[in-house]
Image (spheres, rainbow, N blue to C red):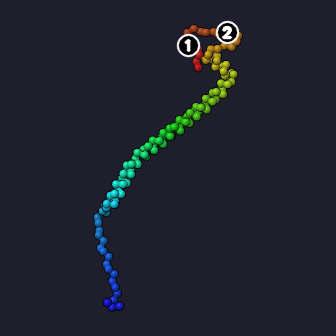
Amino acid sequence: MSASTPRSRPSPRPRLERDRPRLTGRAAALLVAVAILVVMAIVPIGRYLDQRSAIADIDRRAAELEAENADLRVEISRLHDPAALERLARSCLGMVGPGEAAFVIPGRTDRFAC
């Protein structure tokens, strides 16, 4: 070899042209592992969604009960008024005040409507 002759590089291997990618063993194992993980995740995801729905129902029911509780507190405070108690005693229980006369009409069933 003389110093004036340039060295040629070895030619690269020819590329093989494939119509479709080949499924290797590693790729198949990865696909199987991913499929197993997906199948195993279905049940917990379903439980999570069910619990989220149950929590929303419980929150809605708690709000309803809070509103009902507030209404009952108003009713309790109203019943502490002596005039309201007297009105209820007269209409619901048929009570009369001292010195008043009570008249009962026979055959009337809607007398104490409370």
Q: What is the residue that sits farthest to the right in this orientation? A: 99
Give the residue drawn at x 36%, y 54%: 33
Q: Is residue 27 above or below residue 1?
A: above
State the CA–CA distance, disc 2 to disc 1.
Answer: 20 Å
Quadrant in which the N terminus appears? bottom left
Is residue 59 positioned above or below 91 on the image?
below
Q: Mark 2 belongs to which amino acid?
A: Ala
Residue at image location 36% in from the left, 57% down from the top: 30
In the shown orientation, is residue 78 left or right of residue 16? right
Position of 54 with respect to 83 (left or right) is left
Q: Which mark is residue 109?
A: 1
Bin the neighbour count of mark 2 within 10 Å (Cα to Cα): few under 14, some 14-19, many 20 and up: few
Q: Residue at x 65, y 10 (%)?
A: 102
In the displayed structure, would residue 75 be above or below residue 49? above
Amino acid type at mark 1: Thr
Quarter occupied by residue 104: top right
At which x and y percent is residue 32?
34, 54
Query: Up-down: is 105 above or below 82?
Result: above
The answer to whether 85 appears left or right of 10 in the picture is right
Q: Position of residue 6 (x, y in %)?
A: 34, 87
The residue that disc 2 covers is 101
Q: Residues within 10 Å of mark 1 (few under 14, many from 20)?
A: few
Between 31 and 61, the one lying in front of the other is 31
Instruction: Pick whichever of labels 2 and 1 is earlier in the sequence.
Output: 2
- Camera-side residue: 101 or 13? 13
Q: Secondary structure at mark 1?
A: loop
Quarter residue 88 falls in:
top right
Give the image location of residue 78, x and y in percent: 66, 26
